[in-house]
Image (cartoon, rainbow, N blue to C red):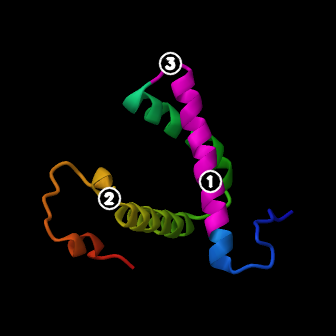
Amino acid sequence: MAILVEPHDGAELDRLITALLNATGAVHQVVGRGIAAGGEGVEVIGRSAARLRAILAVVAEHHGDAELRVITEFLAVATMLIAEEEGFAAAFRPADDDRDDPDDLHAGWV
C-alpha cells in the first residue's frame, strides 16, 4: 500500500515539501515529548535520536546504505539551504568554522 502525499495531482516538489513538513512536524512531536518528560538540551536530543532510530530502523531494513546515503545528503543540503535562506545557518556550523565568505558555505554542494 502506497502512502499518498498531497497534492495528489501536484508537482513532485510540492509533494516533497508536504512530506518534509509532515516529517518535521512528527520529529517536533518526538522532541516535545522529551521536553515534557522533564528533559532538556543534549539529553532530549539524544533520547529523541534513539527513539527515531528505533522507529526508522524498520524502514531502513528495506533500503540499502547507498539509498539511505542519497536521502541523507538530500536532507542535509535542504536543511542548510533553508537555514541559510532564513538566516540561521550558523547554528549548523561547527564552533571552529571561521569562514567569512558566505558563498564558501556552498562548497561541494550538489
Q: Residue furthest top?
A: 38
Q: Is 72 displayed left or right of 3 in the figure?
A: left
Q: Nearer the viewer, mark 2 or mark 1?
A: 2
Q: Which mark is residue 38?
A: 3
> Which residue is disc 1 drawn over?
23
Mostly what secondary structure, the magenta segment? helix
Q: Which mark is residue 40?
A: none
Q: Residue at x 56, y 69 (%)?
A: 67
Choose the circle earlier in sequence order: 2 or 1: 1
Choose the circle earlier in sequence order: 2 or 3: 3
Label 2 neighbourhood size at 10 Å, few (<14), some (14-19), many (20+)?
some
> Which residue is disc 2 drawn over?
89
**Badge 3 amino acid:** Gly
Q: Position of residue 72 (x, y in %)?
A: 49, 62
Q: Position of residue 89 (x, y in %)?
A: 32, 58
Identify the secondary structure beneath mark 3.
loop
> In this view of the protein, can residue 60 be seen by the observer?
no
Identify the secondary structure beneath mark 2.
helix
Contact check, label 2 and label 3, Cβ < 8 Å: no
- Stretch of the chain drawn in magenta: 17-39
**Badge 1 amino acid:** Ala
Number of callouts: 3
Identify the secondary structure beneath mark 1.
helix
